[in-house]
Image (spheres, rainbow, N blue to C red):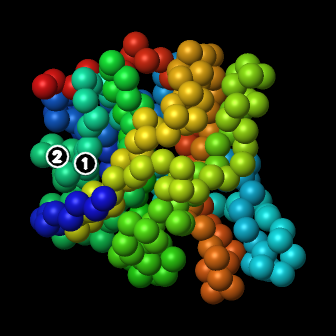
Amino acid sequence: MTTNKSTTVQKRGYVDLHEMAREESISCAYGSTLPKDPTCTLPCSLTETDPSTFLIRGENYLVDGKKVKAKGTLMQLVAADWLRSDRREDDLAGRPGSIVQKYAAQGGPEFFFIINIQVPGSTTYSLALYYMMNTPVEDAPLLESFIKGDDAFRNSRFKLIPYISKGSWIVKQSVGKKACLVGQALEIHYFQGKNYLELGIDIGSSTVARGVVSLVLGYLSHLVIEMAFLVQGNTREELPEFLLGTVRLNHLDASKSVPLKP
């Protein structure tokens, strides 16, 4: 399901979005509720992880079926949210006071790609990752096709590669390290503005995924979770694949999620 909305694009220099958002009250500072820590020593924090951890389709994949180590990412992880609510929280990027709206209001070239992983229950948790690129979307034709495509196309191409780099054997076995076309297994709600595309991934839409995530939540504070996101390349022109972005989640703690005001 796609929601299109017209937004006013603003220009802003490349600044630390966490610091910018923290100037506002937490009720509207979307993008500042999960700290970034490149040293990976701060509990309940995140950073980008080494792209070479992940295997992607190489230039000759259609001939030899070989995957290669990723060499970089198209976008930079600039902010994140770790939220809890009594309902599913959609379109965080489009909300007044969000970092996307702040960054967007003066006509700059920045484009945001937001991945909002929604875990339902009596309390709904949202892990939102904000990726940003400064170069024109047109310079990445496959990404441009994804942004402009319909839901069926997007669902057939958006891919996640998970990796539990630290944690119990049972969680590592349950999660695995195999790339997954998310939209083939889970319901994704798409929200689009002039300078962003947000993917709301509803974990509750799959019984299997719900079971795996419930297991992960039980061990969450003892885990280091790494993920990479990409648009799958299916044709010679779309290969080699490239990562949109990566993340390393360091010992997330459900009790440290930020409650949203009704």
Look at the numbered disc 1 and give the secondary structure of its residue. loop
Residue at 34%, 53% in the rendered image: 189
The location of residue 31, given as percent across then percent down, is 31, 40
Q: Mark 2 or 1, which is nearer the eye? A: 1
Q: Does 1 sit above or below residue 163?
A: below
Q: Residue furthest front?
A: 207
Pointer 1 residue: 91
Image quadrant in which you'd find residue 164: top right
Identified by mark 1, the residue type is Asp
Residue at 32%, 65% in the rendered image: 110
Give the crowd class for mark 2: few <14, some 14-19, many >=20 residues within 10 Å. Answer: some
Mark 2 to mark 1: distance in Å? Answer: 7 Å
Identified by mark 2, the residue type is Arg
Pointer 2 residue: 95
Q: Does 142 sit above or below residue 227?
A: below
Does residue 14 appear to the left or right of 248 in the view shown?
left
Does residue 47 appear to the left or right of 50 in the view shown?
left
Asked if disc 2 and disc 1 are in contact, CB closer than 8 Å, the reply is yes
Which quadrant of the rendered structure holds the N terminus?
bottom left
Is residue 49 at all visible to an observer of this figure? Answer: no
The location of residue 40, given as percent across then percent down, is 59, 28
Image quadrant in which you'd find residue 245: bottom right
Give me the disc on residue 182.
none
The location of residue 124, given as percent across then percent down, is 34, 26
Residue at 49%, 27% in the rendered image: 45
Which quadrant of the rendered structure holds the C terminus?
top left
Give the crowd class for mark 1: few <14, some 14-19, many >=20 residues within 10 Å. Answer: some
Which is nearer the eye, 11 or 198? 198
Does residue 200 appear to the left or right of 24 in the view shown?
right
Q: Residue furthest right?
A: 64
